[in-house]
Amino acid sequence: MALDNQDFVIFLSTIEKFVKEKLIPREEEVVKTNKIPESIISEMKNLGIFGLSIPTEYGGSNLSMLQEVKIAFELGKAAPAFRSIAGTNIGIGSQTIVMSGTEKQKEKYLPKFATGEIIGSFALTEPDAGSDAMSIQTKAEKIGNKYIINGTKRYITNAPMADVFSVMARTKPEKSSSSISCFLVDASLNGITIGEPDSKMGQRGAITSDVIFENCEVSEEALLGNKEGIGFKTAMKVLDRGRLHISAICVGLAERLLQESLNYSTHRKQFGQTISSFQLIQAMIADSQSDILAAKGLILNAALKRDKNENITLESSCAKLFSSEMLGRIADRAVQIHGGAGYMSEYPVERLYRDARLFRIYEGTSQIQQLIIARETINNFLKS
Amino acid sequence: MKILVPVKRVIDYNVKIRVNAEGSAVETNNVKMSMNPFDEIAVEEAVRLKEAGIAEEIIIVSIGDKGAQETIRTAFAMGGDRGVHILTDKNTEPLVVAKILKEIVVKENVDLVILGKQAIDDDSNQTGQMLAAILDWPQGTFASKLDIDGKKIKVVREIDGGLETLEMTIPAIITTDLRLNEPRYASLPNIMKAKRKEISEVNIDDLKIDTKNRLEVLKVSEPAIREGGRKVEDVDELIKMLKNEAGVI
């Protein structure tokens, strides 16, 4: 059961306040320290942000997709690093267990994911396997009632603070989705080395690093769903939800950038008037506003469909492609509207411009989304 | 100890206020509403007293239309125990509110009422004082610190030129100032737990009291737009302007 509307409105208003009063004022501090303050993380846990999507029987709030994207519209207004800390718990980390985990795995992990007592991290990408995810080299060999994991994972979000990794590893040599399994690996096990945090273009405070598995021994109970070959397929199935969530974060960040541009352009004077009275500036504002509303409509429509249990592979990829690309355009216009000031670190748009760039890359690049959209559209045509 | 906390649903403090087309009131259509910020502080203080083992029950009351239930539920999520909703579509002025609150105080055997010092919509700053008067209870208004020891309450108030400390005995009325505490957020787990808390709804007309307003709003208007200043070349020009244009010398 999703949260009823009155209760949801109360929570949405909490999130709006939290973003405005607690997150946005501490963005600069996060940039300087490359770390989300502990007090913020613990407040995010108390507010229930980590458990948004987890079923109520495991201590979460089981928000509908529509509710989840409305929360993401708000969270997206703050620097993306804040949301990132809870991203795996809300998204792919918990959802793969919800969909395919054994009862024992659900009981072990979901309640702690929901409270944020443990932080999850999803480990798929490797040095030689990005968009071509099926070509991962990390292996899990079964010996007796144990699996031995060997391999290197790259750009793994939250790796240094993670308590549990969802590790995608090959259990068969053939290049097929059923050759890849998912293991729930406690970070405290022997044979796991966390690399130095990556030095990134933006999103400081959101930490990624290598995770290296060397003869890491896990019990067979760590195998997702107690079954080989379902890990990759499950991850692909929960991607729809993750893509919509990320799309909604893009909208939030785009709204923030537009706000910053409006604040600036309605105060900055040139040629004796505020620059917002010039039509060439107005054109950029109009294009940005239209982009935001178009993305919002696309996301809300897809969320409604998913809540009716309809397949949204096409819609969620369209939403991810359009929202991340429009965010790129808006970030660019925001800097342009700010002029020289937009190039200076003193104004938040310079930083948000760099933060925004990642959205066209992770959770499936724009090009991968195009392939999915084309495939779905052509298949739909051939089937009809 | 039983605490009563009245909460008012007002236009959210982030919203830019606009006067309606008729100039009779502030526009409330399609405007985000939330709990009066001073009332949030009052709820927070009551919850802290309960957490400290000083209070046993916190009753939340709100007067207003159906939407007031959302405000009561927000107070539940912060820690309020049960609610009373006085249903009315009319605006109620401070004296009417005080009279209604008195009914509830007597009926529920309340020991302490904590109110916001004022609501950010009409800024009346009267309800707490009026309630103290009609109950003939002591009042500690604009509280910035509260200490309760048995039946004794110490209230620190911020006044011009410093701090004033009052001592009074329960039952009493407290109104909250901005610095009393920092209210907690209504968290999702607590919103969900609050589902089980009950609100009893009472129609304002079923109360056996005179709820007629004595005040009438004649007109509401936007503040006059401030005209920009002007620069003068020299003292002579300034004197000329003060004489001829401003007419002050």
Image: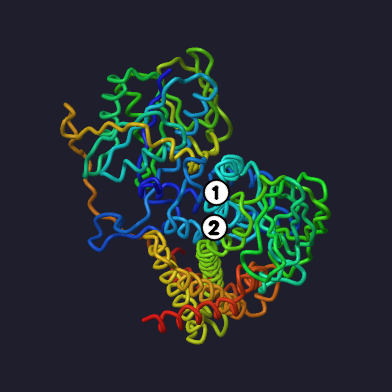
Chain containing the residue with disc 2: A
Give the residue type that dot 1 points to: Ile
Position above or below: A64 against B101: below
Which element carries disc 2, helix, strand or loop?
Answer: helix
Query: Residue at the spot x=61%, y=49% of the render?
Result: A226
Which of the two residues, B29 or A274, is positioned nearer the viewer here? B29
Give residue A382's quadrant in the image.
bottom left
Question: Which circle marks residue A49 in the picture?
Answer: 1
Position above or below: B54 against A102: above
Question: Which circle marks residue A75 in the picture?
Answer: 2
Give the residue type that dot 2 points to: Leu
Of labels 2 and 1, the one closer to you: 1
Q: Around disc 1, counting alpha carbons within 10 Å, would you say few (fewer than 14), some (14 to 19), or many (20 or more)? A: many
Which x, y percent locates residue A172?
70, 63
Q: Quadrant of the C terminus of chain A?
A: bottom left
Query: Residue at the spot x=39%, y=68% of the render?
Result: A301
On screen, residue A259 versus residue A140, left or right, reads left
**Can the viewer see residue A360?**
yes
